[in-house]
Image: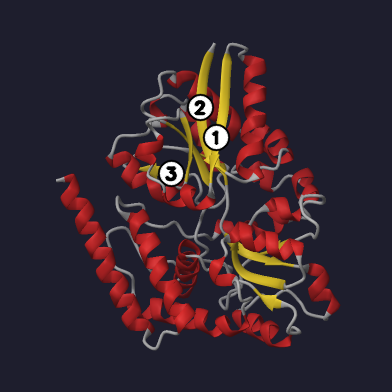
């Protein structure tokens, strides 16, 4: 018996479809046992891959970890093991730039098993009760915030990483995607405008927004009538399914004043193989099963997963199951923004998010200076990482 261990994140979307893939794989290869452990969303976003790779064979990863992972030689380059026709199918059927987000230095380091970006979430029953429509522009978001009764508020996850995500999404949208490239600084003028736009929303936000991540906010939104609309949140199709929570959430494209819902900071999860794995071939075969189109649009989505294969996002059955979650947000993902992935990015994202959250919580009198300070932090962390490598 060969036993492979995998690490994912602790939510039904992150665990159940991978367990289903393990069961399917074992039917094909009875001598194989693949089990999955789970960690918190915060650990998933911040924990060093090089440490996980010492213990686990298969790792579900966030694409900004790629630069550090490649620099520390902790992942298997999939091109060396997977046929080109399979990778070409993954490229053709990528949801937005999800597939390419796991490419680095000419190699593919993970398969986009799960696709996500910041989208909008809303309680259709609450908006309908008050004769309100789902906002399409940011002016409509501000209008909705003023029109809703005080017992129904807007929400915005503002724990550090997600405060940073909303900052980047708005900056990318305002700049048409040219806000920040690998090796460049943040544009101070665009960043200041994004901070100012977020500040406008703060007075209308649910008071616990500053202590919530997307899972916590989705849980709160589905358990109470306190939050009617969230303009920027990583979407979870689970909450759009009957029976998952006590109240149903619906999802839409993010607001935009350009007519196109562009700039959303791409998230999602890729399935990667540790370079320390002793049984690389079966691990690769499992990854191909889990990320393959047929499995993704059937067992994967039916098990609570949020597929990375485009055929699942356009599938009528998957959309009926999720009240059109995939159809109603696909445009946002297709126009999404890929974060830089340099070695040192994860530390920058966390620390920059802390500063943005603090500025929004306490008031920011000079948004442009905040972005200048973020650029100093960026230079410091990038230099530190470069010096450590040398």
Q: In the image, residue 245 lies at what x, y percent? A: 77, 54
Is the C-beta separation of discs 2 and 1 under 8 Å?
Answer: yes
Visible residue check, residue 108: no
Residue sitting at x 51%, y 79%: 198
Visible residue check, residue 295: yes
Above or below, 355 relative to 350: below
On screen, residue 335 versus residue 131, left or right, reads left
Q: Which residue is mark 1?
A: 37
Could you say which is closer to the camera, residue 55 or residue 18? 55
Q: What numbered label is drawn on residue 102?
A: 3
Q: In the image, residue 149 lies at what x, y percent? A: 76, 84
Q: CA distance from mark 3 to mark 2?
A: 21 Å
First along the sequence among labels 3 and 2: 2
Residue sitting at x 38%, y 72%: 355
First along the sequence among labels 3 and 1: 1
Mark nearer the viewer, 3 or 1: 1
Circle 3 sits in a helix, a strand or a loop, which is it? Answer: helix
Q: Assess disc 3: are there few (<14), some (14-19) or many (≥20) residues with their C-alpha within 10 Å of its C-alpha.
A: many
Q: CA distance from mark 2 to mark 1?
A: 8 Å
Q: Which residue is mark 2?
A: 5
Q: Assess disc 2: are there few (<14), some (14-19) or many (≥20) residues with their C-alpha within 10 Å of its C-alpha.
A: some
Could you say which is closer to the camera, residue 48 or residue 165? 48
Q: Quadrant of residue 89?
A: top right
Residue sitting at x 46%, y 37%: 110
Q: In the image, residue 220 lies at what x, y percent? A: 69, 64
Q: Quadrant of residue 69?
A: top left
Above or below, 111 relative to 181: above
Q: CA distance from mark 3 to mark 1?
A: 22 Å
Circle 2 sits in a helix, a strand or a loop, which is it? Answer: strand
Q: In the image, residue 146 lies at what x, y percent? A: 68, 88
Could you say which is closer to the camera, residue 326 or residue 389? 389
On screen, residue 30 versus residue 348, left or right, reads right
């Amino acid at each position: 018996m060969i036993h492979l261990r995998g690490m994912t994140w602790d939510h039904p979307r992150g665990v159940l479809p991978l367990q289903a893939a393990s069961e399917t794989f074992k039917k094909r290869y009875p001598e194989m046992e693949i089990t999955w452990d789970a960690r918190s969303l915060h650990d998933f976003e911040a924990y060093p891959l090089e440490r996980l790779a010492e213990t686990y064979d298969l790792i579900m990863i966030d694409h900004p970890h790629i630069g550090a992972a490649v620099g520390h030689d902790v992942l298997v380059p999939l091109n060396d093991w997977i046929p080109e026709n399979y990778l070409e199918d993954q490229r053709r059927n990528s949801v937005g730039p999800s597939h390419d987000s796991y490419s680095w230095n000419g190699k593919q380091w993970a398969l986009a098993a799960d696709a996500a970006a910041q989208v909008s979430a809303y309680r259709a029953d609450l908006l309908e009760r008050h004769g309100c429509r789902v906002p399409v522009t940011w002016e409509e978001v501000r209008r909705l915030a003023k029109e809703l009764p005080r017992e129904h508020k807007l929400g915005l996850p503002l724990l550090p990483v997600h405060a940073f995500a909303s900052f980047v999404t708005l900056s990318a949208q305002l700049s048409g995607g040219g806000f920040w490239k690998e090796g460049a600084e943040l544009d101070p003028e665009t960043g200041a405008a994004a901070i100012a736009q977020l500040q406008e929303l703060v007075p209308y936000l649910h008071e616990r927004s500053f202590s919530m991540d997307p899972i916590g906010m989705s849980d709160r939104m589905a358990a109470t009538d306190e939050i009617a609309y969230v303009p920027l949140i990583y979407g979870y199709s689970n909450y759009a399914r009957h029976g998952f929570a006590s109240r149903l959430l619906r999802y839409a494209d993010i607001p935009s004043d350009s007519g196109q819902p562009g700039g959303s900071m791409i998230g999602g999860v890729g399935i990667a193989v540790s370079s320390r794995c002793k049984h690389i071939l079966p691990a690769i075969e499992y990854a191909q099963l889990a990320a393959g189109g047929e499995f993704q649009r059937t067992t994967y989505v039916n098990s609570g997963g949020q597929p990375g294969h485009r055929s699942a996002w356009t599938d009528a059955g998957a959309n009926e199951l999720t009240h059109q979650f995939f159809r109603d947000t696909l445009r946002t993902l297709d126009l999404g923004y890929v974060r830089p992935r340099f070695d040192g990015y994860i530390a920058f994202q966390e620390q920059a998010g802390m500063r943005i959250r603090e500025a929004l919580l306490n008031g920011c009198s000079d948004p442009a200076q905040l972005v200048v300070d973020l650029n100093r932090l960026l230079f410091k962390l990038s230099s530190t990482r470069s010096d450590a490598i040398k």
